[in-house]
Image (cartoon, rainbow, N blue to C red):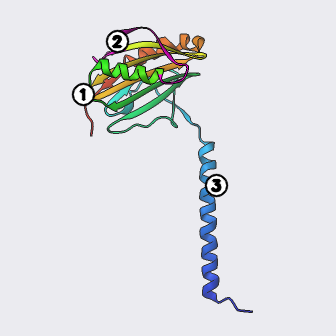
Amino acid sequence: MARITRGELRNLLGALGIVATLAGLAFGLPALDRSLPSQRAVSPDEPYQVGAGVSVVPPAGATVDVTETRPGDAEGTALFRLGPVRYAIAVRPFRGDLETAASRLRKRITNTAGYQVTGAQLAVSTAGGLSGLQGGYTAPGRGGRYAVFVAEGLTIEVTISGNDLDLGRTLPQIEASTRTLRHDGERE
């Protein structure tokens, strides 16, 4: 039988240490991630940076879903929740006019199985001077609203969805929040 040298023992212990560290990372980090809440409270008194120089003041009582929120210098998304109602804002680079941006958003909505745009599309504007178009849509068991704005090479898309009762209760707060959308013109 061969003897294990001191160097081989040290190598074996080092390898076991690396395996233990990797196992800790593989199992410990996902467990830690699952233990952290996916929703965090946001202040209704401060603008929230969505991305690409776009900000919004969230409605009182809203939380931000950190699993679906991705701010960035050239684009960004923010998903707020007001109870069971979803309030999403997406900012993306865009070359085109407001009608084209609205048409693209309506097409994305209706390309989802069971979703359809309802009613007339109306003009809307924000307190900061952004002009846009808004409308409504339905889905199985849900209703929704959308708005789209175009600013300096960006499209700003707002979608709101929830069951009719919850949506009816929260829509005034969300519409007030949407009117606070601003584009500061600074992008990197």
Image coordinates of residue 47 in percent, x first then y, are 38, 27
> Dot 3, crowdedness within 10 Å: few (<14), some or many (≥20)?
few
Image coordinates of residue 74 in percent, x first then y, are 32, 37
Q: Residue at label 2? A: 124
Residue 168 is drawn in which quadrant?
top right
Q: Which mark is residue 152?
A: 1
Q: Which mark is residue 101?
A: none
> In this rendering, would 63 be left or right of 5?
left
> In this rendering, would 156 be left or right of 136?
left
Residue range highlighted in magenta: 111-133
> In this rendering, would 15 be left or right of 54?
right
Image coordinates of residue 137 in percent, x first then y, are 49, 14
The answer to whether residue 5 shows anywhere in this view is: yes
Quadrant that contains the C terminus: top left
Toward the viewer: 107 or 87? 107
Q: CA distance from mark 2 to mark 3?
A: 49 Å
Q: Residue at label 3? A: 27
> Dot 2, crowdedness within 10 Å: few (<14), some or many (≥20)?
some
Name the residue located 59 percent from the left edge and 58 percent from the top edge: 25
Check if residue 114 falls in the magenta segment.
yes
Cβ atoms at labels 2 and 3 below 8 Å apart: no
Quadrant that contains the N terminus: bottom right
Q: Is 50 located above or below residue 34 in the figure?
A: above
Name the residue located 61 percent from the left edge and 74 percent from the top edge: 15
Q: CA distance from mark 1 to mark 3?
A: 45 Å
Instruction: Say whether disc 1 or disc 3 marks the residue closer to the N-terminus.
Output: 3
Instruction: Say whether disc 2 or disc 3 marks the residue closer to the N-terminus.
Output: 3
